[in-house]
Image (tube, rainbow, N blue to C red):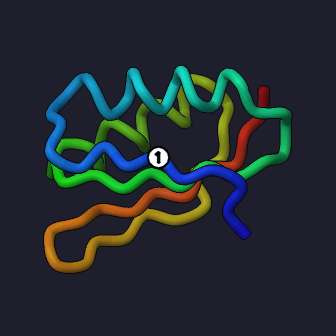
Amino acid sequence: MTDTTLDVKGLNCPLPILKAKAAIKKMPSGEMLEVLATDPGSVADFDAFCRATGHELLESTEEDGVYRFLIKSNS
């Protein structure tokens, strides 16, 4: 179940990560953030972001040019 959805389609690096960082900062630990992006570089960016911050990347998928990330907050 997703608690918050962040649509950053059309934005390029570093904006998807910066917006996700701001959104997840407001979320209690354990809540889920769904991020929808179109920047192909966001795949590596969100993997690195989660490893660096301790948030859990539960899912990373792509369909029709839209990348979907499901991140569990560890705030």
Quarter of the image where one finds residue 52: top right
At label 1, counting other C-alpha atoms closer than 10 Å, the crowd grade (few under 14, some 14-19, many 20 or more) is: some
Question: As displayed, is residue 24 above or below residue 37?
Answer: above
| Residue 62 spot, x, y in % from top left | 28, 72
- Quarter of the image that includes the C terminus: top right
Q: Residue at x 15, y 51 (%)?
A: 40
Toward the viewer: 30 or 27? Answer: 27
| Residue 60 spot, x, y in % from top left | 43, 63
Q: Is residue 2 left or right of residue 28?
A: left
Q: Is residue 67 left or right of residue 1?
A: left
Q: Residue at x 39, y 63 (%)?
A: 68
Amino acid type, residue under disc 1 in the picture: Leu
| Residue identified by numbered label 1 | 6
| Residue 15 spot, x, y in % from top left | 27, 25
Q: Residue at x 52, y 65 (%)?
A: 59
| Residue 47 spot, x, y in % from top left | 43, 43
